[in-house]
Image (cartoon, grey):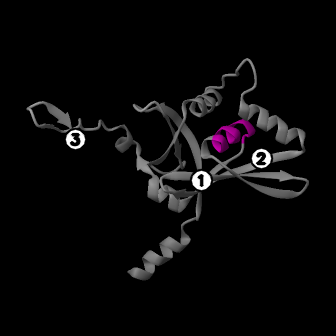
Amino acid sequence: MISLALLVLAAAPAEVEVLVRDVVPTREGMEAVLLAPAAEEVVLPIFVGPAEGNAIRMKLERRTPPRPLTHDLLDTMIRTLGGKVTRVYIDDLKRETFLAKIFVLQNGKTLEIDARPSDSIALALRCNAPIFTARRVLDEAGVTRETLEAPRPSPKKRLAPGGSSEQL
């Protein structure tokens, strides 16, 4: 039985292509970019700032800003310099921070550029480049959509000295 489990693990791909399913606001004022593999019920929420979330949302909604955004400018610069974004890879999770790389093909050479996942995703959408994540990142940080959307229990209250209530 153990050898079958090891065989299944060995056959699992080390990376998984994901699609941007949605960008949703959080109660904390951030945005959650929801990435999901096509054939799985899990989503990988990546929390980004409002500006990055807006840039990703605009592209998903096929809206064009009156002037180029930073990611539009970066796309133009890469293409003008003879490069092409070939893929984005969210490759690690360290201390609750996702790490990513942008792969650019220029003059027959592939360049690997360290970048924030939010910028990587926004650029990939503009360049029509595929987005991948490491399987272990998806396994560690992925959640079901139902879990993500489930209402959170309200904070428990207790009586503080003097009889007033305080949140735990």
Query: Disc 1 or 3, which lies upstream in sequence?
Result: 1
**Which secondary structure type mostly characterizes the magenta part of the structure?**
helix
Counting residues from the start of the chain, the first of labels 1 and 2 encountered is 2
Task: Indicate which disc residue 99 carries.
Answer: 1
Disc assigned to residue 136: none
Give the side of residue 90 with respect to residue 6, left or right.
right
What SS does tag 2 mark?
Answer: strand
Q: Is residue 121 left or right of residue 142?
A: right
Amino acid marked by disc 3: Leu
Return the residue nearer the eye: 2 or 140.
140
Residue 106 in picture, x, y percent from top left: 87, 52
SS for tag 3?
Answer: loop
- Residue 168's label in the rendered image is 3
Residue drawn at (54%, 60%) of the image: 135
Taking the spot 29% from the left edge, 35% from the top edge, the residue there is 151
Sort mark 1 into few (<14), some (14-19) or many (20+) by Cα contacts within 10 Å. Answer: some
Q: Residues within 10 Å of mark 2 (few under 14, many from 20)?
A: many
Picture coordinates of residue 99, whole percent (x, y): 59, 53
In terms of depth relative to the viewer, which is nearer, 166 or 107? 166
Looking at the rendering, in which quadrant would you find the C terminus?
Answer: top left
- Residue hosting label 2: 85
